[in-house]
Every structure is written in structure tokens, then in C-alpha cells.
Amino acid sequence: MDEHTFCAVAEAIQLLQEKWTLHIIRALLPGPLGFNELGRAAGGCNPATLAQRLDRLESQGILTRTVESVMPPRTSYKLTCSGYELQEVIDAIDRWGRRNIPGPGAGARPALEHDEAAATAR
Amino acid sequence: MDEHTFCAVAEAIQLLQEKWTLHIIRALLPGPLGFNELGRAAGGCNPATLAQRLDRLESQGILTRTVESVMPPRTSYKLTCSGYELQEVIDAIDRWGRRNIPGPGAGARPALEHDEAAATAR
DNA sequence: CATAGCGCTATGTCTTGTCAAGTGCTATGC
DNA sequence: GCATAGCACTTGACAAGACATAGCGCTATG
């Protein structure tokens, strides 16, 4: 799109803002996982989306897909070093989130900040 | 959701992965902008989405909307300190992107330092 | 022998983002 | 003085994306 905003930054943002991407990477940080296992660890990603993300992340060189056995099916996804470097991104988000998101565990502040009224009364 | 995965991190990811959010914040780092101005600076966000994101970011305390004059319309959006703290998230993505994204030139793409003075904008 | 699990694709629905146009007004160019 | 373009947004129709669900061939359990 805009070559003027370009550089890696915009590209990276574009990539990381896709739904589930960060969750997937985060789930994969502790170690390799299988497909369904990963979907659950990411917080319940449905298989269609998961497969798509995985595809993209693999072709981006962020993770690798290793078929351990075809039948009984067993596949393992693990981060490449490029993927592990995303830890610092997630760490940064983590740090920010703990400081700036109300959250249920934030003491005497229940999560009543649900402003889903954005519907604007259609 | 998963109690173990939950808390601020997942929330923050959820928030930041919405389309344009990070672009908007990034565009706002150098200083406050108006609505259309911001939409363009973010890379061409359409007004509907922009308004929605802005709404959410404001109610999250990440930015403030100041109406400078109603007619001729002039509004200014600027980050709060909570918003500025996202700089380190964007920096992390930036750093990662420069290292790990091939880039449009697919080769030696010198990293132009065009927006590094953002922190002083206040 | 029935059930549940694996990795993953195909289906239809619902949510989300996008385009295009339009509002009331003012500051500019001719 | 009038046309044009800009401002900050809203609305409504539409496309793209994510969703739940079911299912494939197979095997390791109960």
C-alpha cells in the first residue's frame, strides 16, 4: 500500500495485528506444540483460522512445521529463532498490559469497564 | 477463558490486534493530530474504522480527544502517558521488523530513522 | 467394540472492516 | 461572489475475515 510509511515496521504491524497471531506465538514460546494443542493453548482458536495463521507464519520463517508421523497424525510446531525474538515484543505488551489494563486481578477494581455500548443504539 | 493465560496480557493483545490500532498509536507518537490527518498518517484508515478505534482508545485512556473549535471543526487527538508507554511496544516491533522482515526492496534496505524523535513530543 | 483423540479441510453464519457518499460550515482561489 | 476544497464525522450497503461445526482416515485407549 503506502510505500511512504513502509519499512519493516508497518509490515510487521500488519503481520502481528492479525487475529490470533500473537496468541499463537505466545503459546509457542514455552515449547513446541501440536495443532489442536496449540489452538487450545492460544485461547481457543478455531482450526480454520489457526491453519491459515500457521501457514503464513511458516512462510514468514517465524515457525516451523515438522511432521513427526503421518499416521497416527502428529505434527509439531515450533518457533524459529526469528520467532523467539518476538518474545521481547510480547514482553513489552505484557509489561504495558499489566500497568495499563484494569483487569480483574487489579485489586479493588472489578472489570466493569465493559463499554460494549459502542453499538450506538441502531 | 483460561485463567492461566488470562489477565492483562491477553487483554492487551486483544486490544492491540484490532486493525489500525497500532498504526494509529504510531502515527500519534510524534505529536497530536486531527481526525483526517491521523487517518492519513496511519496509512489510510477509513473514517468509520478510525472513529471506532479512537472511541475505544479514548475510553481505554490511551488517548484524549480535544475539541479545539466546533465550527470550523478542529479536533485534536493526543496520546496520554499510558499511550506513550506503548512506544516501547512499537519499538520492539520496529526492532524485530527491521531484523526479520524481508522488506519491499527484498534486499539491502537501509533503515531510515524518520520517526525516532517521537519521545520528545510530549 | 465404542469412544476419543490426532491434524486438518469443507461448510454456512455471523462479526468486522471497507467504500462511497453526505452533513454543516469556513477558508481559499479566481 | 462563487466554486472548490477542507474539516470531523455518520450512515448504509457491501466484502472480507473469523466463527462453530462436522467430518476424513486412523490408532490408542476404555
Image: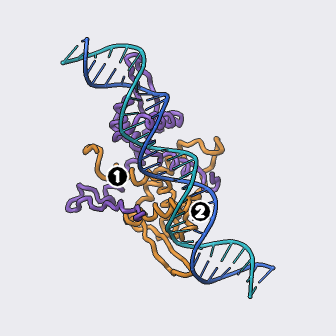
Chain colours: A purple, B orange, C blue, D cyan
Frontmost residue, A21 versus A7: A21
Nearer to us in this view, B96 or A108: A108
Kind of residue at badge 1: Glu
Residue C13 x %, y %: 43, 43
**Where B67 falls versus A21 (above or below)?**
below
Q: Quickly name the residue at label 1.
A: B11
Taking the spot 37% from the left edge, 41% from the top edge, the residue there is A26
**Mark nearer the N terminus (2 vs 1):** 1
Numbered disc 1: what chain? Answer: B
State the residue at coordinates (40%, 62%). Answer: A118
In the image, B118: left or right of A100?
right
- Dot 1, crowdedness within 10 Å: few (<14), some or many (≥20)? some
- Of residues A81 and B5, which is closer to you in this image? B5
**Residue B112: % across, % down:** 61, 55
At horizontal 41% and vertical 20% (from top left) the residue drawn is A68
Q: Quadrant of residue C24?
A: bottom right
- Looking at the rendered image, the quarter that the N terminus of chain B falls into is top left
Dot 2 and dot 1 within a common chain: yes
The x, y position of residue D13, in whole percent, is: 56, 55
Q: From the viewer's perspective, is residue D28 above or below residue A4?
A: above
Element on which disc 2 rests? helix
Q: Amino acid at mark 2?
A: Arg
- Is any part of residue A46 visible from this angle? yes
Q: Secondary structure at mark 1?
A: helix
Q: Which residue is mark 2?
A: B40
